[in-house]
Image (tube, rainbow, N blue to C red):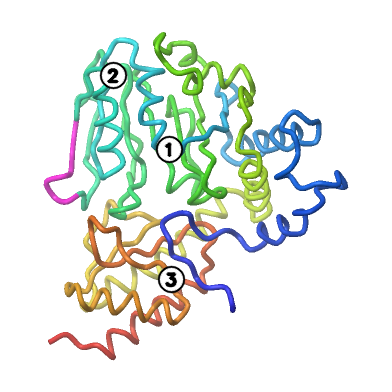
Amino acid sequence: MERVYNFSAGPSMMPEEVLQKAAAEMLNYENSGMSVMEMSHRSPVYEKIITDAENLLRQVMEIPDNYKVLFLQGGASTQFAAVPLNLMSNGKADYVLSGQFSTKAYQEAQKYGDAYAAASSKDINFSAVPKVSKEDFRADADYVHICFNNTIYGTKFSYIPDTGDIPLVADLSSCILSEPVDVSKFGVIYAGAQKNMAPAGLTVVIIREDLLGQARKETPTMLDYKVMADNGSMYNTPPCYCIYVAKLVYEWILGLGGLQAMKARNEKKAALLYGYLDGQDYYKAPVAKDSRSMMNVTFVTGDADLDKKFCAEAAKAGLVNLKGHRSVGGMRASIYNAMPYEGVEKLVAFMKEFAKNNPKM
């Protein structure tokens, strides 16, 4: 069977070049006589892999020297607890609620202190990102938390909120590596790798060094950023193979020209799909135009049965995982870095044909 165009929100499509290289090295990595899956994380050959991975990510994202890069486990959802445990030293934190994951992070933080919803777009079903300014945040908050791209609702911050001297913490799980981002504007960036970076199982945390060492005493050792930083992400066995694949992805991005080139590729794909959606009336794109995500494009026909038929017929045409999240319905096309332009072309062609063959009553 031929490879399909996988529009899954995550785990998502991987670059074919990366998969081919990983396959070629599967049984014998650089004449070690073993797979990366099998080797000790304390071995010199693996220590070079994780060191190279960090150095490449620093190069790709232009991470300043005063930031630590951590390769962790537990998914981005574990960071919902790790962030307040490490940073909520005064017991206060402000959250911007722009979707399901920022809301879950907010609810988790309430277990550890005074978590305050500084803004929310729940009243409009998270169809736009709240507009916030420095005045919306409490002056004594330990940090401000946002989810930069909202996978389920197809929205994204078009700006980086000004939080003044308060550290900004951002979940970048579904948009990391899709375009350049000024890391220096953030205190902490975290991201699950399974959307744009590597297989599920790896979480990357980028943290400014002055924020280390503030964890409350009851913080589990495995969630203490300073412990992980002091041990080079190897306090315990890290997700070795995921880190290796992430290294290959970083190399792939650099080979294409870095994040500026990646942004141009992603803008071209998003422009094709949104351009079609804006030029017809069969499908509706519910997201406000100034909050649209480049990575996750949501749309509906307005008829649940038609939506279901659309997803089923699209899958038969090799366009898979287009069903929207159960909390939203409709369709969602996740067009991450690895999705080629041709995949979006085929999707738009299918959308046109489906609309022609399935007129609304």
Mark 2: amino acid: Tyr
Task: Tell me which corner region of the image, top left, top right, bottom left or bottom right, holds residue 299.
Answer: bottom left
> In the rendered view, does 223 fall on the left or right side of 115?
right
Q: Which residue is disc 2 drawn over? A: 112
**Dot 1: element:** helix
Q: Position of residue 352 (x, y in %)?
A: 33, 83
Q: Quadrant of the N terminus?
A: bottom right
Whichever of callouts 1 and 3 sits on the residue coming sooner in the sequence is 1
Q: Which residues are magenta?
A: 118-125
Q: Is residue 94 above or below residue 58?
A: above
Whichever of callouts 3 and 2 sits on the residue coming sooner in the sequence is 2
Instruction: Name the disc covering residue 320, or none.
Output: 3
Q: Which residue is disc 1 drawn over? A: 76
Mark 1: amino acid: Ala
> In the rendered view, does 67 fall on the left or right side of 79?
right
Q: CA distance from mark 3 to mark 2?
A: 40 Å
**Dot 3: element:** strand
Q: Position of residue 8 (x, y in %)?
A: 43, 61
